[in-house]
Amino acid sequence: EDQVTQSPEALRLQEGESSSLNCSYTVSGLRGLFWYRQDPGKGPEFLFTLYSAGEEKEKERLKATLTKKESFLHITAPKPEDSATYLCAVDNAGNMLTFGGGTRLMVKP
Amino acid sequence: DGGITQSPKYLFRKEGQNVTLSCEQNLNHDAMYWYRQDPGQGLRLIYYSQIVNDFQKGDIAEGYSVSREKKESFPLTVTSAQKNPTAFYLCASSHRTSNYGYTFGSGTRLTVV
């Protein structure tokens, strides 16, 4: 059974304080790993897709990396507008995503 | 613009009442999904459909029903058998070869009054 575990559950940062969110996964055959951002009361929005170990993707202050067992979402010099819940999900080639529980990020000015 | 639309945004249900949440997409996606999200929790799969006129139960299907009569539409009915329906409901769709995973709607918040 595919499993995705995200840590920490919640993370408080000061503006400019860089950190990383973790997504550990077990899957029978990884077709892709996805990161989403979800603002309160809204649907998740797509951020990145990673396909193979060693791959990295960047967008503004965010960088996602992938190993054979986990993915990290690195946030460099975060701003208050980066506050959101970040969701990780894996696709096992069955066209079905398994989601982690999310990390709620709060960035204080 | 292509997208996925959920309505209504807020819905109130009385005890013993069935309510239906709407989900429509114009992305020409084959698959559609319904998730439930409770405060501070992840997404839990209720039902999914990969082709018209076919759907499968997810992890928490009890007390819910769906239909898929058209490719564009996947309505969810929350029946009176669902004892704790207050939650945020998300609809999503995907294409078999998508590199973006799922496209989500903006959600419906259902409250029992």
Image: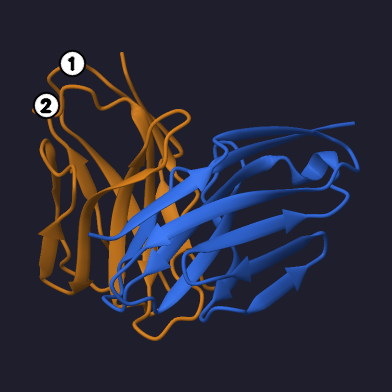
Looking at the picture, tell me which residue is in the foreground, B72 or B95.
Answer: B95
User: What residue is shown at x 48% (from left), y 30% (from top)?
Assistant: B40
Residue B1 seen by the camera: no
What is the three-letter code of the residue carrying label 1?
Glu
Element on which disc 2 rests: loop
Crowding near the residue tagged with mark 1, few <14, some 14–19, many ≥20 C-alpha atoms within 10 Å: few
* Residue position for label 1: B15
Residue B80, label in figure: 2
The front one of A98 and B81 is A98
In the rendered structure, which amino acid carries the disc numbered 2?
Ser
Which chain does orange denote in the image?
A: B
| Viewer-closest of A52 and A61 | A52
Q: Give whichever of B93, A54 is nearer the camera.
A: A54
Q: Is residue B27 above or below residue A102?
A: below
Circle number at residue A38: none
The image quarter containing residue B23 is bottom left
Q: Position of residue A103 (x, y in %)?
A: 57, 41
